[in-house]
Image (tube, rainbow, N blue to C red):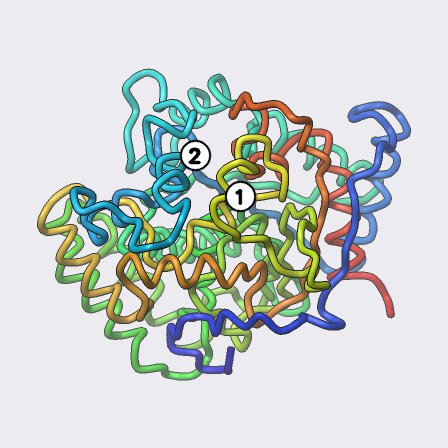
Amino acid sequence: MPHENNFQHDELSRKSPGDRLRTVELTQGALPESPAWFDAMAQQGALLNQAGVRAIVLLHGSIVGTDVFGMQRLDEAGGLKRGYSRGVSGVDALLAAMREGGNGIPPFSGGLTVPLANDEATKKALDAQVGDAGNFTASYTGLLQQSLSKHIPTPIPCLRLLWSSAHHHLGRALAAIQLLNDLRTLCEQHQLAAGQRVLLLAHGQAGLVAALASNLLCPSPITNRPKLFQLLTTTAPHAGHADIVSAIQRIEPLLASGSLLNGAQLDIVTLGTPVRYGWDPSGIGRLLHIVNHRNLRTDGKTWLSKMELPQVTMEMPIAWGGDYVQELAVAGSDALPANEAAKAANKAIWELVESYDGFERWLECARRAVRFPTDGQCILADYKDCTNSTTIRDHYYGHAAYTRLNAMLFNTTEIVRSLYSTP
């Protein structure tokens, strides 16, 4: 997308990414936490340190307890009582497989509901329920910092952020504000400055939060930044988000002056993020997208997912083609805000960030089968999580593999190779 993207939606181009793309497979290397594994991670930490990376942020939500496929909006927009078929064979079976209550993804234990709080109690509950399935656990975060910092004089701090997991435009916009506010605090605490880098790893729809943040970080005075801030300042308190006003007041002048990160660069890696919002490359450093993918196509377009009905419904329960959440949670899908004030705020933001709406639009976007945005380097990675198991918690439709402990060294190596290796 162009500099000064101004919140435009991605083009959803089906063209080959060309030189932007690499295809890799998860291989069995040193066992996690073995001496050889620690040595390999320490080598990557030394390379990150040499590249100027001074902090790593792990941003994620929750798969459980959320409408991760966005069926609530599809039901509202499509008219559930009328049915969806519209002459397209297999659509109703696919949507039944995606719908909460029937997709095998359980509710959050302990009565927790969206929006989730970024506090230790919620993180601890999430760790206990799902472990490292689509979740950067406390032990994962600590081990990442420990292993990367083994051979460098100053440890690379690793910060875990849990966003609200409110899978709609308002929820993601609020999370983008909070992310920028947290990044400002990080830069102040660690006295980051020009020549240094922050590496952000964003899982799933947290990558959409980062995409919105990239537009807000645009160094030019884009028109929709003050418009979004005004919308949130006016409507968010009535939707139960009064705390966001102080965050906006803190970061808005820093964004206008281009000083939010004290001159440091923000590098972003998305893990299984659906292609929706466009990225603005002008205000961030390096950008990489990693998608769990296994080619099922016969037309040679190996960089696209396979969206053929009704076959896709049979593939999903074993994650045969990779990450089906990344593939299907596209424009037109979403969870619904909790009250009328939030719905009104969501609609206003929607008009800024996404022109697509309605069931037909969702079906069109899903069938385009696009794995990557227009901007950034791309990795198609086979995480070897298709084991023919129909137990959804084993893979969560291919969306859980990125944060597994057994993939930490693999991910770190590929990120360093893509973003920080010397040509």
Percent across and percent down for residue 128 are: 49, 17
Mark 2, other Cα within 10 Å: few <14 / some 14–19 / many ≥20: many
Mark 2 or mark 1: name the one nearer the start of the chain: 2
Above or below residue 413? Residue 397 is above
Give left or right: position of 256 versus 140: left
Q: Amino acid at mark 1?
A: Gln
Percent across and percent down for residue 324 are: 52, 44
Would you say the residues marked 2 and 1 are in contact, meaning their CB atoms lie under 8 Å apart? no
- Nearest to the eye among marks 2 and 1: give it: 1
Towards the viewer: 289 or 128: 289
Secondary structure under tag 2 reads loop
Which residue is the site of mark 2?
62
Above or below residue 380? Residue 58 is above
Percent across and percent down for residue 267 are: 61, 61
Towards the viewer: 75 or 406: 75
Residue drawn where x is 37% and y is 59% of the image: 331
Residue drawn where x is 59% and y is 48% of the image: 271
Q: Amino acid at mark 2?
A: Ser
Residue drawn where x is 34% and y is 63% of the image: 361
Mark 1, other Cα within 10 Å: few <14 / some 14–19 / many ≥20: few
Secondary structure under tag 1 reads helix
Give left or right: position of 59 versus 119: right
Above or below residue 342? Residue 214 is below
Give left or right: position of 3 versus 92: right
- The residues bearing labels 2 and 1 have C-alpha atoms spaced at a distance of 28 Å
Q: Residue 311: which disc?
A: 1
Q: Residue 286: which disc?
A: none
Residue drawn where x is 29% and y is 55% of the image: 86
Q: Quadrant of the C terminus?
A: bottom right
Towards the viewer: 62 or 225: 62
Percent across and percent down for residue 147 are: 76, 34
